[in-house]
Amino acid sequence: MKYLSLLALLTLFSCGNKEDVLLPKSNFTIVKEVNDLSPIYIFYRTNEKDTLVEVNRKNSIISTNWILNVDKRLPLRLVIPEVMKLQQKKREEKAHKNEKAENYYSYADTVGRNLAFIPFTDVFYKMEKPLSRSLKIYFYKDKLVVNDSIISKADLQKYLSYMPIENDSPFILCFDKNSSFGSYIENKVFIKTIKVNKKALKIDENQEFIF
């Protein structure tokens, strides 16, 4: 338990100051090891009753894999705009661009008891609800909705297995902007463990909606 507590808490020593990031937790590892990396820290801050976000990317190198260590307490409405800025900077870089360099979020695997990572390099975030009639999974703060049906997480795999899906269409993931980054990572990892007819659930990996 002591090891796990340390794992879920990253510490950055900057200008003699100690700053902590509480990492999200999940029960499954998507990616276990990333090499040639640059850490970026997104801190949770408060000012009286206001929650603030602060980004430290002093050691980030464009040509490396970026690991975003985001405090799990931050709401998505504050985190994702900052992530979008970082993504845009890396995508627009020409001089030192490395096509193989990826972007990952870090989290703690509570079962494997290791630091884990989930890639988001190709995700384009949109701060709105999707307008299309595509298949959608909505993660609200207190419920999960598939198109217009409220489904429990425990029943999701069974529900999707019986759901008619035309042309093997991918699902679009949508997340409540007021939910925490910790729940966002937990749900992202959860959805990757879902199988439909023994195959991984087909997800649109190029866009996510934060509404």
Image: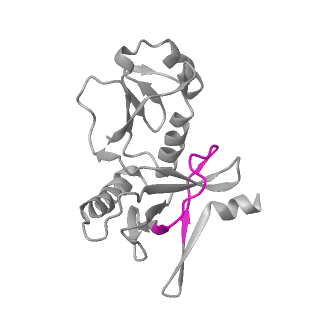
Can residue 73 be seen by looking at this rendering?
no
Q: Is residue 151 left or right of residue 53?
A: right
Query: In front here: 33 or 39?
Result: 33
Which residue is pictured at 39% across the width and 20% down the height?
A: 168
The image quarter containing residue 35 is bottom right
The magenta-colored residue range is 20-40
Q: Total number of numbered labels?
A: 0
Q: Is residue 15 left or right of residue 31?
A: left
Task: Residue 204 in the image: state x and y as whole percent.
Answer: 37, 34
In the rendered image, the quadrant that contains the C terminus is: top left
Task: Residue 192 in the image: state x and y as whole percent.
Answer: 52, 36
Is residue 5 depicted above or below 150 in this figure?
below
Is residue 111 depicted above or below 129 in this figure?
below
Which residue is pictured at 46% across the width and 39% down the height?
A: 141
In the rendered image, the quadrant that contains the N terminus is: bottom right
Is 94 contained in the magenta span?
no
